């Protein structure tokens, strides 16, 4: 439930529902689906951890795939001791709250995560290994360690460490020696001390005396406890209790037996014999063996020579153990390797001058042998992940050139997969490894020829539907099931269900032996009908596609013809042939004229009196002549003989003249009275109700400058509008003709009685 997740994170239920759950969904780490009951009420939130699911699907390619149910149960108990909100079920033992459960509110999730990481990294004495390297200025090593665990900056880790110190989750380690620079987790230290005390009390004084006597351990043969210090330490910590007694595992009730440490399934082999003396249990006084622990070679005395002493041997005879001694090289126990090194027995011998033969084999235990020497073909380093499922078959290729050729094909397939999954490191390799693993599992017969199998079966993508991302019903980008294939499978299941219903309705009295035949015939008829309808649909779709492409080609031809006609038109200004309506020189001249007209309008609008049309016309003619003289003089000064270059130079000069006059006009208008009044008003309103500090004055001056600039631009637009209206009013307009001139025929007609009656009837009353 959301309240359970809120208890683990230290947040409220509303924050979890509106912030945490949407954030988890958006991150892509997990999917969250509400589980509803029959009435439609949400009774749980089902989270699916995608990294853990992907790791389990890879089966050995990811460290997360090594975690089984018992390991996860142990890790959950550890998290409960630190973060558990605590609960007291009616029919189960009470689970106390973790020692950091009191931390709630803003930032509680970060503090709890930091505490969990510190507790996991702490040693048995509670001390936390500090992060090495140089420290940023102003920070200590404890803050750098917390920042490294959380993956954040040291500045962000400082308040987290302060919060943990205030909550007494961590403490300073030997502050009298190291100061505030090293961390200690008191809960981990106390838990190990309780475990050691309980272990000593359970062993009794006899075992303590036996363990305290060094003479006995040196004269007698070593036992299992002497040969494995780690196992002895694990036996001492069997009584580890992190936060009181009475833990209740509500999420893993189905875990059988006791939950061991995070070492996997460690059941002893009852069929294997042992040559190691057992230990001593002080509680019962009987010789017993060590409890379930990590597998290790039995402890036996090693000697330098195995001749003349029946008690010495070079290996081990324990069932399931390595028969070689400790100094044996890797691969010496391979039968083919031993056979090759020992030379031929009963076959051809190169020393006798007999012909040598090469033999090949398929499988990991059949390396290639040519002329009595082993030539294994290794998997390329960059393809280790992608070819992991077939790595044991790669040695059977026989030739290095074959391996290089296959590696080239594999790399080509990886490049194609990266177009679907992106350039993320390792994603394409994992997808290809999953494909090879999936197809090896479906292979009923052993792979005899790896090269042929990879080219024909392993590497090619098999689309189960229309999607390019589908590979045998699995999506390449996400690794999940293909929805299109699921839809096709659902359609086929629905078709079979419909046919079965129709047969049952049409033939209710068919015998049980004949019903299957009738059903098959009806299903075949239904399938043939749907196939015919699909064929007709495909034909119509093909016809529409052809018509669409024909229309596109026709439109392309029409556009090409219009483009040719447009290119053949002469220039409108100079009459140059095939200029597409306007040659480059005339186009630049038009742009120059537009820029010069704008520059002239700005100069006239600022200086002229728009109420005097004669003065406006005179000033416009004068300013235009001066501007054109500047523009054309600059173009001639460049000395360019090409008309296009000269026209471009004139346009460049006109652009600069326009920018200069615009800046000058705005500068004059910013100093005008309306602009100063607006600036003073804005300055006064900005400082209203504020202290006249230097910072507030600067803010007010900046606002006043913006207001002054805004007023200047508004005034310039207003002056240009007045100039345009004045020029439009100065243009003489022709008097509209009179009605007698517009309709001479109607004016010449006499007014009779009918016309008068009509006029009187239609006139106003």
Image (cartoon, rainbow, N blue to C red):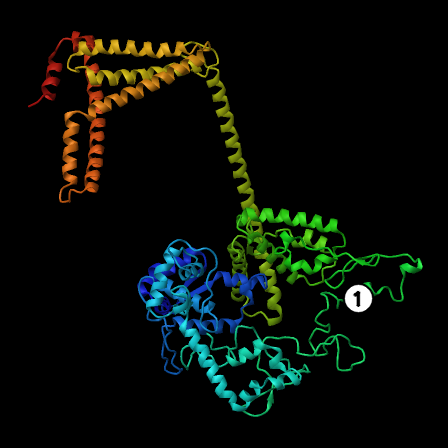
In the depicted structure, whether residue 715 falls above or below residue 2: above
Residue 582 place in picture, x, y as percent: 42, 15
Question: Which residue position holds label 1?
Answer: 338
In the depicted structure, whether residue 87 falls above or below residue 678: below
Q: Nearer the viewer, residue 264 or 324?
A: 324
Q: Residue at x 54, y 46 (%)?
A: 537
Mark 1, other Cα within 10 Å: few <14 / some 14–19 / many ≥20: few
In the depicted structure, whether residue 408 falls above or below residue 487: above
Instruction: Check the image and name the residue furthest to the left.
Output: 765
Task: Note whether residue 684 is visible.
Answer: yes
- Tell me the quarter of the image containing the C terminus: top left
- Tell me the quarter of the image containing the N terminus: bottom left
Q: Residue at x 66, y 54 (%)?
A: 458
Residue 47 place in picture, x, y as percent: 43, 64
In the figure, is residue 316 to the left or right of 764?
Answer: right
Q: Nearer the viewer, residue 236 or 655?
A: 236
Q: Nearer the viewer, residue 485 or 361?
A: 361
Q: Nearer the viewer, residue 111 or 610?
A: 111
Residue 679 place in picture, x, y as percent: 17, 32
Residue 661 place in picture, x, y as percent: 27, 19
Task: Note whether residue 735 is visible.
Answer: no
Q: Regarding mark 1 in the picture, which secondary structure is present there? A: helix
Q: Residue at x 29, y 9 (%)?
A: 625
Q: Residue at x 64, y 58 (%)?
A: 388
């Amino acid at each position: 439930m959301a309240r359970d997740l809120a208890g683990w994170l230290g947040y409220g239920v509303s924050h979890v529902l509106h912030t945490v759950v949407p954030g988890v969904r958006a991150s892509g780490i997990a999917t969250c689906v509400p589980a509803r009951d029959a009435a439609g009420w949400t009774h749980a939130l089902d989270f699916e951890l995608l990294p853990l699911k992907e790791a389990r699907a890879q089966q050995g390619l990811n460290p997360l795939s090594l975690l089984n149910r018992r390991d996860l149960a142990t890790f959950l108990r550890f998290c409960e001791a630190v973060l558990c909100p605590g609960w007291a079920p009616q029919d189960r033992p009470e689970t106390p709250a973790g020692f950091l459960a009191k931390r709630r509110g803003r930032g509680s999730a970060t503090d709890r995560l930091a505490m969990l990481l510190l507790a996991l990294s702490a040693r048995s004495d509670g001390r936390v290994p500090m992060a090495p390297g140089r420290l940023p200025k102003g920070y200590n090593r404890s803050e750098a360690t917390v920042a490294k665990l959380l993956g954040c900056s040291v500045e962000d880790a400082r308040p987290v460490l302060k919060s943990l110190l205030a909550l007494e989750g961590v403490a300073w380690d030997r502050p009298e020696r190291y100061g505030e620079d090293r961390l200690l987790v008191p809960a981990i230290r106390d838990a190990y001390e309780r475990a050691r005390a309980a272990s000593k009390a359970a062993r009794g004084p006899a075992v303590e005396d036996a363990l305290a006597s060094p003479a006995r351990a040196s004269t007698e043969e070593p036992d299992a406890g002497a040969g494995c210090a780690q196992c002895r330490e694990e036996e001492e910590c069997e009584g580890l209790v992190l936060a009181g007694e009475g833990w209740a595992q509500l999420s893993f009730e189905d875990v059988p037996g006791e939950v061991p440490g995070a070492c996997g399934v460690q059941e002893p082999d009852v069929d294997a014999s042992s040559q190691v003396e057992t230990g001593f249990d002080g509680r019962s006084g009987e010789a017993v063996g060590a409890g379930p622990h990590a597998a290790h070679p039995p402890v036996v005395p090693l000697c330098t020579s195995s001749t003349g002493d029946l008690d010495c041997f070079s290996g081990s005879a324990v069932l399931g153990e390595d028969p070689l001694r400790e100094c044996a090289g890797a691969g010496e126990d391979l039968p083919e390797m031993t056979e090759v090194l020992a030379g031929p027995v009963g076959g051809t011998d190169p020393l006798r001058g007999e012909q040598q033969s090469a033999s090949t084999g398929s499988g990991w235990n059949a390396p290639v042998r040519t002329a009595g020497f082993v030539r294994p073909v290794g998997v390329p380093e960059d393809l280790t992940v992608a070819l992991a499922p077939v790595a044991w078959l790669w040695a059977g290729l026989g030739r290095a050139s074959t391996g290089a050729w296959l590696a080239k094909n594999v790399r080509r397939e990886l490049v194609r997969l990266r177009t679907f999954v992106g350039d993320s490191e390792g994603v394409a390799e994992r997808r290809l490894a999953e494909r090879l693993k999936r197809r090896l599992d479906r292979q009923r017969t052993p792979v005899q020829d790896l090269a042929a199998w990879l080219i024909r079966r392993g590497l090619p993508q098999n689309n189960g539907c229309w999607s390019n991302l589908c590979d045998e019903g699995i999506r390449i980008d996400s690794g999940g099931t293909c929805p299109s294939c699921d839809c096709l499978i659902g359609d086929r299941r629905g078709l079979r269900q419909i046919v079965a219903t129709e047969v049952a309705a049409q033939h209710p009295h068919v015998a049980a032996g004949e019903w299957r035949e009738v059903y098959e015939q009806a299903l075949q008829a239904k399938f043939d009908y749907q196939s015919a309808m699909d064929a007709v649909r495909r034909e119509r779709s093909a016809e529409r596609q052809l018509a669409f492409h024909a229309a596109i080609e026709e439109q392309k031809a029409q556009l090409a013809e219009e483009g040719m006609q447009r290119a053949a038109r002469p220039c409108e200004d100079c009459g140059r042939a095939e200029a597409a309506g306007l040659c480059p020189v005339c186009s630049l001249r038009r742009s120059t004229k537009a820029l010069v007209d704008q520059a002239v309008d700005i100069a006239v609008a600022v200086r002229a009196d728009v109420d005097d049309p004669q003065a406006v016309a005179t000033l416009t003619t004068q300013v235009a002549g001066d501007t054109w003289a500047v523009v054309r003089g600059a173009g001639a000064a460049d000395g360019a003989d090409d008309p296009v270059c000269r026209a471009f130079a004139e346009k460049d000069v006109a652009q600069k003249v326009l920018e200069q006059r615009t800046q000058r006009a705005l500068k004059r208008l910013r100093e005008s009275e309306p602009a100063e009044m607006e600036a003073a008003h804005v300055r006064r309103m900005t400082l209203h109700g504020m202290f006249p500090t230097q910072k507030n004055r600067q803010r007010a001056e900046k606002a006043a400058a913006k207001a002054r600039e805004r007023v200047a631009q508004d005034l310039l637009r207003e002056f240009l509008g007045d100039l345009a209206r004045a020029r439009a009013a100065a243009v003489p307009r022709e008097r509209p003709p009179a009605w007698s001139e517009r309709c001479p025929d109607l004016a010449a007609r006499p007014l009779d009685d009918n016309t008068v009656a009509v006029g009187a009837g239609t006139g106003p009353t």
